Image: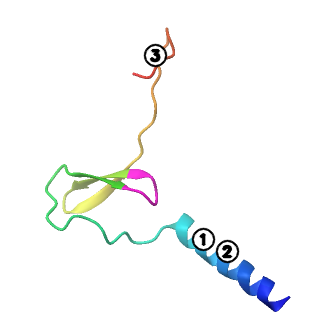
């Protein structure tokens, strides 16, 4: 019973750590203005601007006639 509780606590801690986000240490060190980086943990694109990484959320846009992706 104790092992089950420890296992659930460990699983919950890992899940929260991944959801809240962890610092990705694989950022390019020589980034220039406008560089893009895909964060696989958050599944988001990051753009380097003004000496910091900015998260960009891309959305899918559909045309009104055919419904195809633009």
Near-viewer residue (11 or 60): 11
The answer to whether residue 13 is above or below residue 30 is below
For the point 50% across and 10% down, the residue is: 66
Q: Report x, y in % for residue 21.
A: 48, 67
Near-viewer residue (56 or 39): 39
Tell me the SS state at disc 3.
Answer: loop
Q: Main secondary structure of the magenta part?
A: loop
| Residue picked out by circle 3 | 63
Categorize mark 2 by other alpha carbons within 10 Å: few (<14), some (14-19), many (20+). few
Q: Is residue 40 magenta?
A: yes
What residue range appears in magenta? Answer: 39-44
The answer to whether residue 15 is above or below residue 2 is above
Q: Are marks 1 and 2 in contact (CB under 8 Å)?
A: yes
Q: Report x, y in % for residue 38.
A: 34, 53
For the rendered model, the colour scheme is rainbow
Q: Say which quarter of the image contains residue 5.
A: bottom right
Categorize mark 3 by other alpha carbons within 10 Å: few (<14), some (14-19), many (20+). few
| Residue picked out by circle 1 | 16
Q: Quadrant of the C terminus?
A: top left
The answer to whether residue 48 is above or below residue 8 is above
Q: Is residue 41 magenta?
A: yes
């Amino acid at each position: 019973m104790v092992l089950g509780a420890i296992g659930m606590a460990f699983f919950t801690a890992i899940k929260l750590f991944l959801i809240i986000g962890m610092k990705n240490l694989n950022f390019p060190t020589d980034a220039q203005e406008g560089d893009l980086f895909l964060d696989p943990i958050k599944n988001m694109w990051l753009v380097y601007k003004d000496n910091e990484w900015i998260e960009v959320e891309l959305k899918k846009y559909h045309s009104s006639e055919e419904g195809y992706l633009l």
